[in-house]
Image (cartoon, coloured by chain):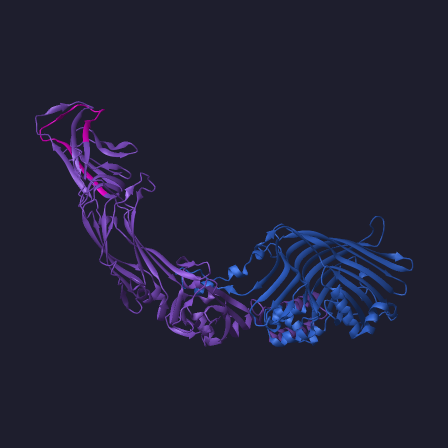
Chain colours: A blue, B purple
Amino acid sequence: MLTVFIQFVDLLKTNPLLFLFFLLAPEALLAGSSDDPFNQEKSFSSKIEINAGYQFSSDAITNHLARTYFLAGFIDRDMKNTVSKQLFPVNRLGADAGYSITYTRKINSFLHKPGFSWFVSLVDQDHLHAEFTRDAFEIYFKGNSAYAGRQAELGKFDFFLLHYQQILFGLQREYSCGHGILKYEFGIGFNKGQKFQALHSDRASLFTSADGEYLDIDFDLTLRGSDSLKSNLGAFNGTGGSLQFAASYTDEQKNEFSFRLQNFGFIQFSDQSYSVPADSNFKFEGIDATSLFDFSDSIRTPVSSDSTYVRGFLTRRSKGSYSCKLPARLSVSYRKELPDDKTGISIGLDHVFFTSYLPHGWCRFERKINNRHQFGVIAGYGGYTLWQLGLSYKLNLAGNWLLGLESPFLSGWLNSKSGRAQGAFVSLRKYL
Amino acid sequence: MTSRKTDLIYFLHIYTVKLSVKNGILYFLVISLFLSFSCKKENERPQWDVAVKGPILQAALTLDNLIADSLQEDNPDGSVRLVYDSEVFKLNPDSLFIIPDTTLKTLNIWQYPAYVVQPNTPFYSINNNIALGISGPLLTEVLIRSGKITLDIRNTLPTKVKVTYLIPKAFKDGLPFKVQEFVDSGSVSDPGIFSGTYDLDGYLVDLTGATGTQTNTAYYNIEALSDPAGVSFSIQNGDTLINLNTTISALVPEYGRGYLGQKTIHQTSDAFVGVGRLIRSGNIKLDSLTMDLEIENGLGAEIQALVSSFISLNENTGNTVALTAPNVLNRFINLNRSTETGIASDPVIPTYHNIHLDNSNSNLLALIENLPDRFNYGTDFSLNPLGNVSGSTDFLYRDHLVKTHLRLNMPLRFALNQVMLTDTQEIDVHDLFDLEPVGLSTFTLLADNGFPFEMDLQLLLINESGSVTDSLLVPSRIAQAAVDSDLKVISSVRTAIPIPLDETRKQNLLDARRMAIKAKFTTPSYPDLVQMYSSYHLDLKLIADGIYSIR
């Protein structure tokens, strides 16, 4: 809660008017059209769609540092200093990468009612999120030298990495309701857990004495992970389920109100998952090397760092099943399509539960140039990062193809040094 | 990476234009390809440098690290005295007597008219003595700790023969030593052969022979019996009735009784002390000390001991100091015989004689201040100096002979002047920590000295070829603790010695295979004596402050 507060205070300080614009005045916006701006859906009975993309975003970590880290490059002082200037007392980052393929088919009736479609999706998804203090970053990337004589607060700390596959079955219905059109959708997914790693700490601190004579280390953390012997695509380390629900209503003035809950579920990882709890408070004064100076005995005990570093708390490793919740996204939005049938404006708010994500407000402006091209501009605030500005493009190709490109974080491309988010998504749809 | 990315963007642009309206799948593939190429890793892991500050090593040195705790004893006030207790002489049992390996041949050839032997009929029997060849003592009884007897039999008779070998006066668990074996039939050209070796461990053997009046002589009996399941056969003139070799070997006595004889055993030997090897140079002044030399006689015979020499040898300097003690050296010391208890686990009550030396009756102080590596000594032990006064009831138990204990006792109160202790340690920095990622740093040695002497501590790195490549501590002086007027420590004093680490020193550390440790000690106001207390200690800490590369 503290972190949420800090983020919103920051938002209010930076631009309270825009914040209010997003949250308090949706009726001032106009809304747009459906998913396919070229309205090809009605002419075909089925479609197949492939989606792929990734995003990284943080309120502190720059793209430059994150990219260098994930691509195992050398992180120089400038990169670290750039992040240091942007650090909050508590910071967060999130990353997702994945792809999916979805097949949707209309059916004439279901339970004697028209307007139904069924769909099936196959998804492969990587997810990572973390929450960390300013000191944790400084200690991890810069070392403890600057903390001589003071305490570094390293907790609360959270790191969570998940890789899973999902097969999703669902039904959609679209029908006239009153003077408008109501759409709703329900899906149920079966999840296969490939890998997870989690590190959670409620309390962690490191005190470095002024002269470096000792370190006071205090922590309470739990390290968890799936079976480390099996982590490839075929690894079946856990199973679970998830639900998806969405509904939207479009009135005759083309005002569309939407609600969507995605990926509300869990994965129960197998009993081969490990858990390493560690709760300790100790003073480290160096490895005991007394035997090096033992003149009295010709038999010396070798000096070993193992006995010092590998303490009892690191050996309390246990195995057991573990249930982890999937990042579940809840979003609400409003869209208005202008009378020219070319322009649409949307506004929305979403949140990803069970992660370090913060409520995310966004606004999208889209305009069709002709029957082939649509361009869009996206602006937002929140999530794992702060301000965002992005672009989207949709291309209606011959042969009933629809190509979509989107990057919600232009800063990743324009400001390679200090930008804090990047992402790219591509989708390809074929109407059959 | 950047140029690769630029190329791909160009590639993407060209093909986007060409394929823009033809096939969306190609769009998708091209973009996906771009994204995947953008994700090539540069290294196995991300890399960065951190500035770290913290403790690396610590050591808490007490007197136990300088002097083995087995040599120390604490007084009630915490002051420490040095006690060296060691067995410096033990009579070698083989110097009293040994039982040599002995072989005896038993051969009998029939020189009479032929006669017929029926099955299962004894046709040869003999009682015989075997002298054990013991030189000096005249033993009547011996308990064998270990030993073997080997029988080699050759049979030229045309029938199988059953041979019984008996030592009637050798008992174990109440039974005499007895062997019964069959030897196959044979001929002169192709004899039947038997060979067998048997343990004599634990046998108590009477050595008074067949008559019971001899010494060092065992008595045995051999009987030959025709095959009980065979047929009658004829013994002709010239036939060999028995051809048997008895070999007694590797006999080690556990106990012997009889007359041990008169003998003088001169023994020169040395006892390792090792002080000089540790202390390479300097001067030591000691307070006082005593030395007790205790001679223990576990023999069942009188002995007369004579200490002819006792020399302190410093192998480092080559200096020797001979003991001067008119009341002890070259004077006969008589020890009565021990007595038997009849208890197997503790069979002997020894007799003792103690020689006490101190500053008043010897030059013991000079002997120890020589910092000996070894004590060389010469002793004479005369056995039964008055002859066979016991009526041949002397005894010996192998583990209870004659031995001498040396007990040196001195207060750990001394004055040191530039006394240098040296030692060399095998080291492998790789085992201790990974030094490769350590960048430009400064290590600091913090020494909290609670000893009343200053130290000059040097840690020298030695590479594989034995060359000293670096001296880690410059300056190397560690200040002494604060002391009162009695030179007793009031409080520790801290000395900080910076040890810069650059690339050269890092390489020296990585190449080091050994570390020579030289510690030079000087007490305040030499030659004033300083008492050591068990609470004195030196705390060392190595602190790092520098760059570490995460790899």
Please name the residue shown 19% across and 31% down the image.
B222
The one nearer the camera, B406 or A171, is: B406
Please name the residue shown 25% across and 50% down the image.
B92
* Magenta stretch in the rendered image: B222-249
**Residue B244 screen position, x and y as percent:** 17, 36
Name the image quarter holding residue B17. bottom right
Image height check: is A44 above or below A19?
above
The one nearer the camera, B258 or A417, is: B258
Is any part of residue A309 visible from this angle? yes
Name the image quarter holding residue B532. bottom left
Side of A40 where B238 appears, left or right: left
For the C terminus of chain B, the quadrant is bottom right
Tell me if residue B238 is in the magenta stretch.
yes
Is any part of residue A31 visible from this angle? no
Side of B288 where B206 appears, left or right: left
Question: What is the chief secondary structure element of the magenta stretch?
Answer: strand
The one nearer the camera, B203 or B22, is: B203
**Residue B23 screen position, x and y as percent:** 70, 66
The one nearer the camera, A421 or B97, is: B97
For the N terminus of chain B, the quadrant is bottom right
Name the image quarter holding residue B218. top left
Side of B85 where A55 appears, left or right: right
Furthest residue to the front?
A: B360
Tell me if residue A381 is in the magenta stretch.
no
**Residue A263 screen position, x and y as percent:** 74, 57
